[in-house]
Image (tube, rainbow, N blue to C red):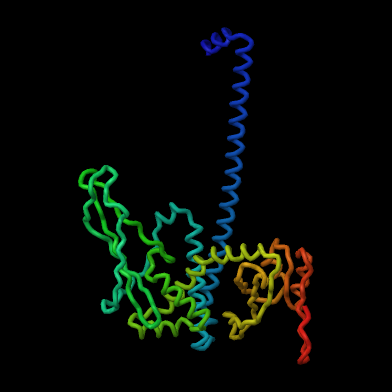
Amino acid sequence: MVQAQESLSNLNAEQLRELALDLIAQIASRDKQIIGLDQSIIIKDREILYRQAKIDQLTHEMAVLKRWKFGRSREQLDAGQASLLDETIDADIAAIEQELLDLAPADKTAKEPRQQPKRTALPPELPRVELRHEPDSTTCSCGCQLKRIGEDVSEKLDYTPGVLTVQRHVRGKWACSECQTLTQAPVPAQVIDKGLPTSGLLAQVLVAKYSDHLPLYRQEAIFGRSGYPIARSTLAQWVGVCGVQLQPLVDALKKSMFQSAVLHADETPVAMLKPGNKKTHRAYLWAYAPGAFENLKGVVYDFCESRAGEHARTFLGDWRGGLVCDDFSGYVAAKDMLRRPVLRRAIHSSVGEPVRT
C-alpha cells in the first residue's frame, strides 16, 4: 500500500488522468459483465421454472394415463375398446417419457440410466443384410498405419412389405500400435437411440396405423406371420417416441406454412373414446393448408376435443393473412387477427347452384 502511494506520488497530472480513465473503463467493463451474468441467471431461472412446470404437467398426465389404463373404469370396456385404448395410452406414455428424458439435465440422465427390458433375440432364420462402417482413413494422426483389432456389431429390424430383414451394422475397430489410438466409425443416427427398429420399420408402422387404419394389434399379427412377432405394447411405444421425434418437422412445416398469404382451413368430427365412461366423445380434427397458388404443398392437422373457435385462434397465433373457410362462426370470431377478411365458402344445398366464394 505504501509502495502504491509512493508510485502515485511520482506520476504527473496527465499520467494520473490516464490512470483514472483506465480504472473507470475497467469498472464499467466489470459492471457490464455483472449485468450480463445477472441476465443469464434470470434466463436460466426462467428456463428452470419452465422445465419444472413442464415436468410437473407431464408427470400429472402420465399419472392420469396410468390410472385410465389400470383403473376400474377400464374393466367396463369390452375387449375391442380396451385393446384400442391400451394402444393409445401406451403410445402417449412413451411420448411423455421421451419428453421427460429430453427435459432432464444431462448429468442426471448419465447418473441414473434407465433400465431397459430384456429384448428378445432376433431369429437366426431371418435374412441378414450386413452394413459395414469403417473410418474414412486408416492412417493415424501420428503417421502410422492403423490395424484392425475387432468390431462392434448391432442388429436392427427392418421391414419391406411382407418381409422382415435384419440389418447388421458392423463397425470395425482400428488401433495404432505406436500411440495406442483407437479409431472407429461413428454409430449411424437412429430415430430411436439404441432401439431395435430401423426408420423403414417405423415408417411402416406409422403409415399402416394412420393411413391404412390398421390397429397395432392387427400389425402384431402381421409381423408374427412374417417371422418375428412384435408386441403391441412395443409398437405403441415406438409410435409415441416417433411422435416426439417428428415434432420438429411438424413445427418447421407449420412455420413455413405461416409465410403464406392465404390459408385454407376446415374441420371434421372424429369419435374419441372417453376412458372415464363407456361413451364416445365428438372431437375434431382441424386441417390447415396453404393456398392453391402457394409454392408450399402440405397440410398441418391439429387435433382438438371441441369445435370452439379458440382452437383456430390458438393455432394461427400471430399469423396475418387471408383465411379461406366455411361459414362456421369459430373462424369468423378470429377475423380480428387477420390482415384480410375471412373468405367464406357458401355452398348451396340445391343442386345446380354455383358455389360462391
Report x, y in % for residue 344.
77, 76
Residue 70 in view, yes or no: no
- In the picture provided, is 212 more to the left or to the right than 234? right
Report x, y in % for residue 87.
49, 78
Number of numbered markers: 0
- In the picture provided, is 317 more to the left or to the right than 231? right
Report x, y in % for residue 232.
43, 79
Residue 342 in view, yes or no: yes
* Viewer-side residue, 255 vs 67: 255
The residue that appears at 48% across and 64% down in the rendered structure is 98
The residue that appears at 49% across and 59% down in the rendered structure is 102
* Quadrant hosting residue 262: bottom right
For the C terminus, give its image quadrant: bottom right
The residue that appears at 57% across and 11% down in the rendered structure is 8
- In the picture provided, is 52 more to the left or to the right than 308? left
Report x, y in % for residue 190.
41, 64
* Quadrant hosting residue 34: top right
* Quadrant hosting residue 165: bottom left
- In the picture provided, is 173 more to the left or to the right than 322? left
